[in-house]
Amino acid sequence: MPNYFPTVLQNSVRHWQIAGIVYLLQTGLAITLGMQVHGVLQTSIGSSLELNRLMSGYDHTVMTDFLKVHGASITPLIGQLRWLLLVWLAFSVFLHGGLIHCAAIPTKPKISDFWLGGSRHYLSFLQVSGVMLMLALLWTSMLWLPVLMSLQWSLEYFSSEIISVWAVVLISLVYLAGLAVIYLWSILVRMDIIRENNSLLRALVKGLKMLFQQKMPLVKLFSGYALLQFLVIALYWSLDALIGMCTPTGIALLFLAQQLFVYLRILLQSGLYRTINLRF
């Protein structure tokens, strides 16, 4: 695993301009969607006194009263969020298409390469995303539906609740490992489409074959990447605990730190794509 740390980091630095474009596009879309949600909330429940009580911490009684009074206002918002999520997913297909296309270029990518890759591979990558989303939903249902159905039984059957808690933790780790496999498979499929211009079915088969043939190197690579992502998040949490959002200065510093860490995570993701392209 240590060999993958410098490789991912070196390939990340190579794409700093592309990562900046992705960060700006993501931020712009997030602000646009956030303003729409804020407008709906301000119109429907912005004058609610329960909001002040909820800001001090979670209170089940306050939350129950809040939903009773403003449930009708929140329901349309949930419907809008569903469509906003679809917009975000469709937009992310373009972003990842540009990132992976740039990762497959032998020379240092230019900004124009990002736009070219995002548009050229959009339809094929949209199909890949649809397949992987269905697999993720199937994996979630297969794993968590039996757990939810037997959770009450396990709490009554076992002598201690700690057994059920550890079982849920273990299942959560298995679940995350399955999602990681689907994620790596999706990258290999997209890489194959770019390099070989194969059809979706052929790329899925070749990507799955590669996943099994190179499972240990891929596991090591993704473990190193996941650890780097965790270190970035842990560093932000440490700054949050140290500075706190209690003063205007603290809020400004943490906002800047948050944006920097978002950019770093995109940078590491581009490094992962580039490393997979070079080694597999």
Image (spheres, helix red, strand yellow):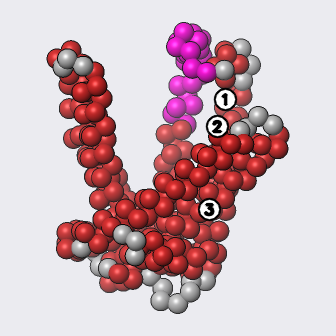
Can residue 260 be seen in this snapshot?
yes
Q: Earlier in the sequence, mark 3 or mark 1?
A: 1
Q: Quadrant of residue 128?
A: bottom left
Q: Which residue is mark 3?
A: 263
Identify residue type, mark 1: Leu
User: x and y percent of residue 145 in the render?
Assistant: 24, 33
User: x and y percent of residue 270 in the render?
Assistant: 50, 70
Q: Is residue 62 magenta?
A: yes
Query: Tag 3, which secondary structure?
Result: helix
- Can you name the residue that lies furthest to the left here? 157
239 or 46, which lies in front? 239
- Can you name the residue that lies furthest to the right here? 248
Query: Tag 1, which secondary structure?
Result: helix
In the drawing, does residue 59 fall left or right of residue 206?
Answer: right
Residue at 44% in and 59% down: 227
Residue at 74% in and 19% down: 47
Marking on residue 63: none
Q: CA distance from mark 2 to mark 3?
A: 24 Å
Q: CA distance from mark 3 to mark 1?
A: 29 Å
Query: Tag 2, which secondary structure?
Result: helix
Residue stretch rendered in magenta on the structure: 57-80
Identify residue type, mark 2: Val
Q: Which residue is mark 1?
A: 41
10 Å neighbourhood of mark 2: few (<14), some, or many (≥20)?
Answer: some
Q: Which residue is mark 2?
A: 37
Identify residue type, mark 3: Tyr
Q: Do the CB atoms of the residues marked 2 and 1 lie less than 8 Å apart? A: yes
